[in-house]
Image (spheres, helix red, strand yellow):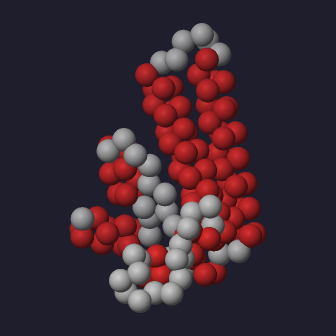
């Protein structure tokens, strides 16, 4: 996937990653390169963006069902909006978990079986 990374960096987009994820039945969730600079305002901004995307999805559905039939192009537009909603919500949730969940902050060696000489243990709550 080296070529895809080059294309994305050159274009400053994630279009290739989104296309691969969609073709695989998944969702690409972009993450900021430095999580240390993320604060609560950034997380709230992601939530507002997700809510705006939900509104766009809802509008797309309303327009598509006005005549009682969802045509192929309308379904594609709905699917596109739904993908964006899922991606934005997942981005928000992932940031919340990465920033605020203890399990995500734990240093992996401290969770070893004890053979490494670690003095701390990790227990899921």
Q: Is residue 108 visible?
A: no
Using residue 12 as the reference point, say whether residue 103 is left or right of it. Answer: right
Looking at the picture, tell me which residue is in the foreground, 29 or 114. 114
Q: What percent of the width, then of the height, locates residue 97?
A: 61, 63
Quadrant the N terminus occupies: bottom left
Q: What percent of the width, then of the height, locates residue 118?
A: 46, 87
Quadrant the C terminus occupies: bottom right
Using residue 21 as the reference point, say whether residue 49 is left or right of it. Answer: right
The answer to whether residue 14 is above or below residue 10 is: above
Residue appearing at x 49%, y 62% in the figure: 30
Q: Quadrant of residue 104?
A: bottom right
Q: Quadrant of residue 103?
A: bottom right
Using residue 4 as the reference point, say whether residue 37 is left or right of it. Answer: right
Residue appearing at x 52%, y 77% in the figure: 121
The answer to whether residue 9 is above or below residue 116 is: above
Quick one: which residue is furthest to the top in this view? 68
Q: What percent of the width, then of the height, locates residue 94?
A: 57, 60
Looking at the picture, tell me which residue is in the foreground, 119 or 66. 119
Q: What percent of the width, then of the height, locates residue 21?
A: 37, 50
The answer to whether residue 36 is above or below residue 56 is: below
Using residue 86 as the reference point, say whether residue 5 is left or right of it. Answer: left
Q: Is residue 50 visible?
A: yes
Residue appearing at x 63%, y 67% in the figure: 101
The answer to whether residue 31 is above or below residue 37 is: above
Looking at the picture, tell me which residue is in the foreground, 6 or 91. 91
Residue appearing at x 57%, y 63% in the figure: 124
Q: How many numbered marks are there?
A: 0
């Amino acid at each position: 996937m080296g070529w895809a990374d080059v294309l994305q960096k050159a274009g400053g987009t994630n279009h290739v990653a989104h296309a691969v994820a969609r073709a695989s039945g998944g969702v690409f969730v972009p993450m900021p390169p430095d999580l240390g600079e993320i604060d609560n305002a950034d997380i709230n901004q992601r939530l507002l963006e997700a809510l705006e995307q939900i509104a766009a999805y809802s509008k797309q559905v309303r327009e598509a069902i006005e005549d009682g039939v969802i045509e192929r192009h309308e379904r594609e537009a709905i699917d596109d909006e739904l993908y964006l909603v899922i991606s934005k919500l997942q981005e928000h949730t992932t940031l919340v978990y990465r920033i605020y969940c203890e399990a995500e902050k734990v240093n992996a060696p401290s969770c070893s079986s004890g053979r490494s000489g670690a003095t701390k243990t990790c227990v899921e709550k």
